[in-house]
Image: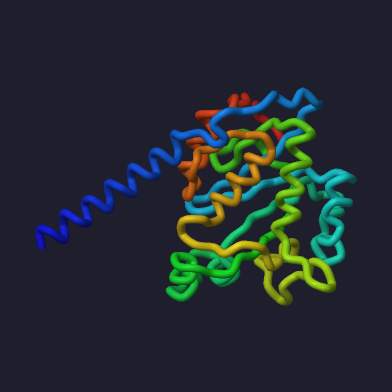
């Protein structure tokens, strides 16, 4: 029993050290030249286990993601201000709209190996500051690179990008098959971190949890003073 407890203790220490180092070691180690173009902004939404990226809607974004309009995502609504993108476990993401609907099967799939999906939602005006939302300024080049990364995450078949039928949390969102396998080590928050690095931000080397991603973003990126009011 003592050997088992020692082994468990070692495993816990290794996991803690890995998470700490994954947060503290920056990725990339060295940042390139700052993009001096007119800055754009994005938002990062956080809950206890998941992060999403909210992209301001304009004509160029609507053109880039026109396939979402074709799939019934009403991004051209007059009240829509952001397209919200998230990547995650297909079984868990689709099977757990609320915590009250949590089931062992989707949890097991998310902790082992699962197919992935993109979840797309709409958001209106966002009042800042608030604890679950962070705003970042990025250059135009980084903004375009991040959109390309998000776009490449969608699976395209012979008919292009197709929405998963009859699956949604509400009236304005939808799910789409995505590239990559989901597992506990490379999950939704590591996808968000990769997208943010394409945008020109620095994250930790490995950020499996929203908390570690937020810590690393605060460590390595210039903080933006958020005044009260509604964004954008």
Viewer-side residue, 124 vs 41: 41
The answer to whether 60 appears left or right of 130 in the picture is right
* Residue at the image point whose x is 40% and y is 44% from the top: 19
The answer to whether 66 appears left or right of 173 in the picture is right
Give the percent coordinates (x, y) of residue 7: 20, 56
Give the percent coordinates (x, y) of residue 126: 69, 41
Viewer-side residue, 208 vs 102: 208
* Residue at the image point whose x is 71% and y is 32% from the top: 138
Specify the quadrant that holds the N terminus: bottom left
Residue 172 appears anywhere in the view: yes
Specify the quadrant that holds the C terminus: top right
* Residue 188 sits above or below residue 130 on the image: below
> How many numbered callouts?
0
* Residue at the image point whose x is 53% and y is 31% from the top: 218
Give the percent coordinates (x, y) of residue 180: 61, 62
Residue 231 appears anywhere in the view: no
Q: Quadrant of residue 6?
A: bottom left
Query: Which color scheme is applied?
Result: rainbow
The answer to whether 136 appears left or right of 48 in the picture is right
* Residue 9 sits above or below residue 29 on the image: below
Give the percent coordinates (x, y) of residue 145: 75, 42
* Residue at the image point whose x is 44% and y is 34% from the top: 24
């Amino acid at each position: 029993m003592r050997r088992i407890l020692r082994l468990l203790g070692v495993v816990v220490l290794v996991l803690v050290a890995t998470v700490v180092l994954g947060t503290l070691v920056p990725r990339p180690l060295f940042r390139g030249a700052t993009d001096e173009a007119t800055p754009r902004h994005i938002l990062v939404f956080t809950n206890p286990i998941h992060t999403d990226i909210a992209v301001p809607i304009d004509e160029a974004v609507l053109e880039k993601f026109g396939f979402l309009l074709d799939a019934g995502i009403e991004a051209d609504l007059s009240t829509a201000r952001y397209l919200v993108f998230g990547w995650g476990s297909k079984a868990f993401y689709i099977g757990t709209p609320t915590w009250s609907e949590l089931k062992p099967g989707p949890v097991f799939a998310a902790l082992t190996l699962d197919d992935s999906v993109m979840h797309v939602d709409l958001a209106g005006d966002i009042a800042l500051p608030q604890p679950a939302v962070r705003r970042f300024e990025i250059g135009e080049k980084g903004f375009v690179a991040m959109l390309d990364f998000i776009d490449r995450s969608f699976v395209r078949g012979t008919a292009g990008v197709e929405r998963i039928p009859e699956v949604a949390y509400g009236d304005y969102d939808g799910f789409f098959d995505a590239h990559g396998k989901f597992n506990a080590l490379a999950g939704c928050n590591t996808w968000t971190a990769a997208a943010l690095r394409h945008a020109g931000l620095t994250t930790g080397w490995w950020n499996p949890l929203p908390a570690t991603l937020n810590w690393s973003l605060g460590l390595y990126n210039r903080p933006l003073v958020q005044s009260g009011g509604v964004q954008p």
